[in-house]
Image (cartoon, rainbow, N blue to C red):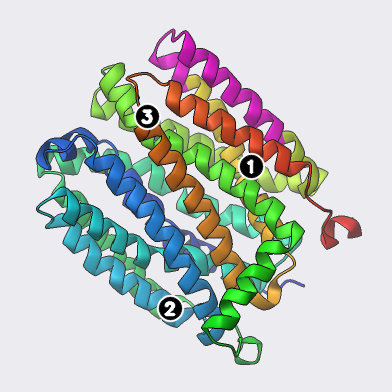
Amino acid sequence: MSRAVPPRLPILLGLLIAVGPVSTDMYLPAFPALALALHNQAAPQYSLASYFFGLAIGQLVNGPLSDRIGRRGPLLFGLGLYILASLGAAASWSTVSFVAFRFFTALGASAAIVIPRAVVRDLADGPAAARLMSKLMLAMGLAPICAPLLGVVCAGAVGWRFIFIVCTLYGVLALILAYIYLPDTLPYERRVRSGAISAFVRYAEIFCERAFLSHAVINACVAACLFAYLSGTPQIFEGIFHWSSVEYALLFGVNSCAYIGYSQLNPILVNRFGVAPVISVVTIWQLLCTLLLVGLSINPPGGLSLAGGLLLCEAAFGLLLPCCMVGALSRHQAHAGSAAALLGTMQYAGGAVAGLGVGVLANNTSQPMAIIMFGSAAVAALAATCRPRLRFELAE
């Protein structure tokens, strides 16, 4: 069953989910300046991994909390924490303090990631939910396009600390708009009346449900590919291929535009072929594209060729993520917040592991990034063969 969706709600939800990419993509081009300022070459990678772990942990709390007390309260509190922690990151004095503030930033941002997904599940299911999720991808897609260029301008004109002042202002804007315009989509009679122990038992039940687990594994592997790309490309293109920060930001913007295009192709393909064929075909596509990246990393012809391979991989990011979210949450309407939280935790845990792997295996080539992306794509393709058919698929 699907409920009426206010016309402006997808834009607001997209703006809220975009807190995540704004907080990561804006400071990617400033990695060299950040490492120099903190006297630690690995500081940017540590902070990114800390941020991903914070997102993973925070969603475990915000998901069941939103099922228990509603969507608005945890979201507004999380945005408040995000604002304060972003200010702390701007004032950081060492690698330890910066990594710690980024962790708390992620704890706050996790509410803005998990709760909009739960709102989507409150309002729709099946292809309708996939279409709504794609609208969110469109609304939040501007962030990865604009954020790196804005980060270049901030770091070049004022310094890397100003990037986190901008993040703070974005959090204030999101908080105000959510307070004014976001309704609580979880009626009082559907709220969960249970404590912490019951929440963890519910997590175990959701995790063991086959449809959730198969889609969540695919989702986590796609995220691992995406975050390996985020962690590896600043050093690869700025350090190895000697691209300027502006050129890297433009590359990131082009890939983000491709991501938006692919995500908007998703509802067309879902309406025409269904969720299951899209997942099956695109996981194979992702596997082939990452295999191409491995080949390019072994015999690197140049930065543009690698950039082209990454552009092809964007198809998997844009087409698979909405379908996996819908598939994972489809059987959990009664606990949509908890299911969305566990889905997000697995997603960002996969991203954190992939990002750390790229940093640990770094050898001044693109091979670590390519190998981790290929391994993740292989697991996603295997998980796609294990997914059960869902209710709305059987109806079709």
x%, y% of residue 75?
42, 74
Give the residue pinned by disc 3.
233
Q: Nearer the viewer, residue 212 or 137?
A: 212
Q: Main secondary structure of the magenta part?
A: helix
- At horizontal 38% and vertical 59% (from top left) the residue drawn is 54
Give the residue pinned by disc 2.
74
- As shown in the figure, which amino acid type bears the numbered disc 1? Leu
- As shown in the figure, which amino acid type bears the numbered disc 3? Thr
- As shown in the figure, which amino acid type bears the numbered disc 2? Pro
For residue 326, above or below residue 304? below
Residue 312 position by quadrant: top right
Q: Is residue 246 magenta?
A: no
x%, y% of residue 310?
50, 26
Image-based side of 394 in relation to 196, left or right: right
Q: Which residues are magenta?
A: 282-307
In this rendering, does residue 179 appear at all? Answer: yes
Label 2 crowd bin: few (<14), some (14–19), many (20+), radius 10 Å:
many
For residue 170, above or below residue 381? below
Of label 1 and label 3, which has the lower sequence position? 3
Q: Quadrant of the N terminus?
A: bottom right
Give the residue pinned by disc 1.
319
x%, y% of residue 207?
66, 63
Q: Quadrant of the C terminus?
A: bottom right
Q: Identify the secondary structure beneath mark 3.
A: helix
Q: Do the CB atoms of the residues marked 1 and 3 lie less than 8 Å apart?
A: no
Q: Do the CB atoms of the residues marked 1 and 2 lie less than 8 Å apart?
A: no
